[in-house]
Amino acid sequence: MTFNSLNLTDPVLRSLKEEGYTNPTPIQSQAIPVALKGTDLLACAQTGTGKTAAFAVPILEILSKNQSRDRNRNIRSLIVTPTRELAIQIDESFQNYGRYTGLKTAVIFGGVNQKSQVKKLKQGVDILTATPGRLLDLMNQGFISLSNIEIFVLDEADRMLDMGFINDIKKLLAVLPKKRQNLFFSATMPNEIIKLSNSILHNPTKIEVTPESPTVDAIQQGLYFVDKGNKKNLLIDVLQDDEIKSALVFTRTKHG
């Protein structure tokens, strides 16, 4: 299968070609045709499988076929994701894939001054990518209305749950239009996520690209049991392995 066989219009195909996209990944080949039909989607796919394009491409395709040229255009698609980094990456993907569609995108997230984000919103936005906290904040201030949302995407749902955003998501669901398309993506499907998906989705098509797994197969894992006082010495010893060309070390606290 190629992207040419997915019945996409020229503006989207042209952008994908410039990005070097020829053959869709498994999640893309399964999810894009479903989303183009307007069907709700429940997808289990890990990060790195190409899932951003799996929802971005059909959203761009659907919205570009019926778009407003009004400067004060309404937000028609909302993508909610748990972190600033993911939000920025998703918005960049929409810009890259949709550069010839005429659709306008914006991204909002906390931890920075809201002034530039509000300015972008006032200029008119078709597709908004957001983290839950800043989204609710700007909604409460009256800068964002979700009354015209046609397509809602909940990305990294399991991480959203782990990070304590479940109540924020419920607040968003309460104000979204009842009639809308929902695209739900999660790397794992624990019971809490299944329960959440049931409250959002209507007769969804279910896709599972890879077996449910907490890690990527390419990662080799190991576990060392050591008392606290020797952790640093053990880490130094491990990192002296000549096979390790670069390393990323996570620690629990700033002091640590």
Image (tube, rainbow, N blue to C red):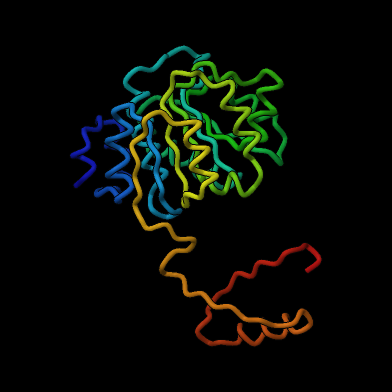
Residue at 53% of width from left, 16% of height from top? 147
| Relative to 205, residue 37 above or below | above
Quarter-wise, where is residue 255 in the image?
bottom right
The residue under the point 53% across, 80% down is 244
Left or right of 152, for residue 232: right
Q: Residue 6: image x %, image y %?
A: 22, 37
Relative to 210, is 228 on the left or the right?
Answer: right
Position of residue 171 relative to residue 208, above or below, is above
View extreme (right): residue: 255
- For the point 41% across and 14% down, which residue is it? 68
Instruction: From the viewer's side, name the closer residue of 89 and 234.
Output: 234
Task: From the viewer's perspective, tell me whether residue 24 is left or right of residue 103.
Answer: left
Q: Position of residue 88 (x, y in %)?
A: 55, 42
- Residue 227, position in %: x, y? 74, 82
Q: Nearer the viewer, residue 4 or 116?
A: 4
Task: Point out residue 139 in the picture as x, y percentages from the top left corner.
Answer: 65, 23
Image quarter hosting the C terminus: bottom right
Q: How many marks?
A: 0
